[in-house]
Image (cartoon, rainbow, N blue to C red):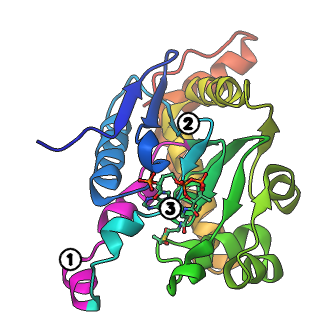
Amino acid sequence: MTQQYILIETPVDGVGLIRLNRPEALNALNSDVINQISTAMEAFDADDTIGCIILTGSDRAFAAGADIKEMEQRSVVGMLTGDKLTDWTRIARISKPVIAAVSGWALGGGCELAMMCDMIVASESAMFGQPEINLGIMPGAGGTQRLTHAVGKAIAMEVMLGDRRLTAAEALHYGLVNRVYPVERYLDEAIKLAAKIATMPGVATRMIKAAVNKAYDLSLQQGLDYEKRNFYLLFGTEDKDEGMKAFIEKRPPQWKNR
Ligand code: CAA
């Protein structure tokens, strides 16, 4: 039987929380861990009672990277034919907002996993890095692209070529994370942020997430066209009718998420 490496909770209404639970390996991400995270996220994505998802680890480690002991025996043919990174891309395809609550190590695939999420709430002890070069390899789950987009070319190069680790304060300064809190508070604060987002109209949150992500893929004009299309589409939702009516009637809106 496959070992269960994650815990699934709903700490408050509307928020689905996935907690990595492989402490003996600092939450190293083997194929089963990634498959379990992807499956749990897809289940929350399909669950009408959930409006925002949190991914977290322990106070000591969000995740110390892809599992080196699993990768050690792999060959290029095994990597290519098994397409070992496919399950990782399932995480980036989740349509609801996802927050990474990061404390301790977020290295290699752990940093990449956090960057696949839409926002990062960090503890003061969080440490971000892409140390794959020490193993004779390179980031393979988005690090060269997402870190460069987040912190810029110069710092990204130093992190990946020189194994520079970014403290939580540096990560905040460079725009990699949204907020930093003492270790006793970061998860509660992530839950508060998620709870607030979960109260927002669900179709609009998905449309906004999709449009912001297009800013990475498309030219400015294509992105603006995509945004305009989503904007117009929201005029077909009951939430648009309710939101505008509630504003005019000076009362809180009652979202239907449709
Ligand atoms: N894979 C497998 N096991 C790991 C691991 C990893 N990435 N990181 C830590 N562990 C295991 C250690 O082997 C150790 O297990 P044992 O007790 O059985 O030996 C246990 O976790 C605790 O680790 P340490 O004793 O090393 O703890 P530490 O506090 O001294 O050091 C650390 C912590 C600095 C994070 C160190 O563990 C480390 O450098 N880990 C590897 C980080 C790394 O290189 N990550 C990148 C992986 S490659 C990748 O992610 C590719 C990709 O892009 C997809």
In the image, the segment drawn in magenta is: 77-98
Q: Is residue 69 above or below residue 28?
A: below
Type of amino acid at the residue the image marks with label 2: Ser
Q: Position of residue 258 (x, y in %)?
A: 42, 31
Q: Which labelled disc corresponds to residue 65?
A: 3
Q: Position of residue 190 (x, y in %)?
A: 66, 31
Side of 95 relative to 215 (left or right): left
Magenta region includes residue 47: no
Work out whether mark 2 precedes mark 3 in sequence or the reverse, and give the earlier one.
Answer: 2
Q: Nearer the viewer, residue 17 or 256?
A: 17
Q: Position of residue 158 (x, y in %)?
A: 77, 81
Work out whether mark 1 precedes mark 3 in sequence or the reverse, and give the earlier one.
Answer: 3
Q: Residues within 10 Å of mark 3 (few under 14, many from 20)?
A: many
Q: Which labelled disc corresponds to residue 82?
A: 1
Q: Residues within 10 Å of mark 1 (few under 14, many from 20)?
A: few
Element carrying mark 2: loop
Side of 94 relative to 204 (left or right): left
What is the C-alpha distance between the residues marked 1 and 3?
19 Å
Q: Could you tell me which residue is drawn at 66 percent across and 46 percent down?
A: 104
Q: Is residue 255 above or below residue 224?
A: above
Magenta region includes residue 81: yes
Q: Nearer the viewer, residue 25 or 187?
A: 25
Side of 75 relative to 164 (left or right): left
Query: Given this view, does label 2 or label 1 mark the residue nearer the observer?
Result: 2
Element carrying mark 1: helix
Side of 187 relative to 54 (left or right): right
Q: Could you tell me which residue is drawn at 59 percent across and 42 percent down?
A: 99
User: Which quadrant, please, contains the N terminus?
Assistant: top left
Work out whether mark 2 precedes mark 1 in sequence or the reverse, and give the earlier one.
Answer: 2
Q: Could you tell me which residue is drawn at 50 percent across and 49 percent down?
A: 233
- Asked if the beta carbon under badge 3 is closer than 8 A to the nearest atom of ligand 1, the reply is yes
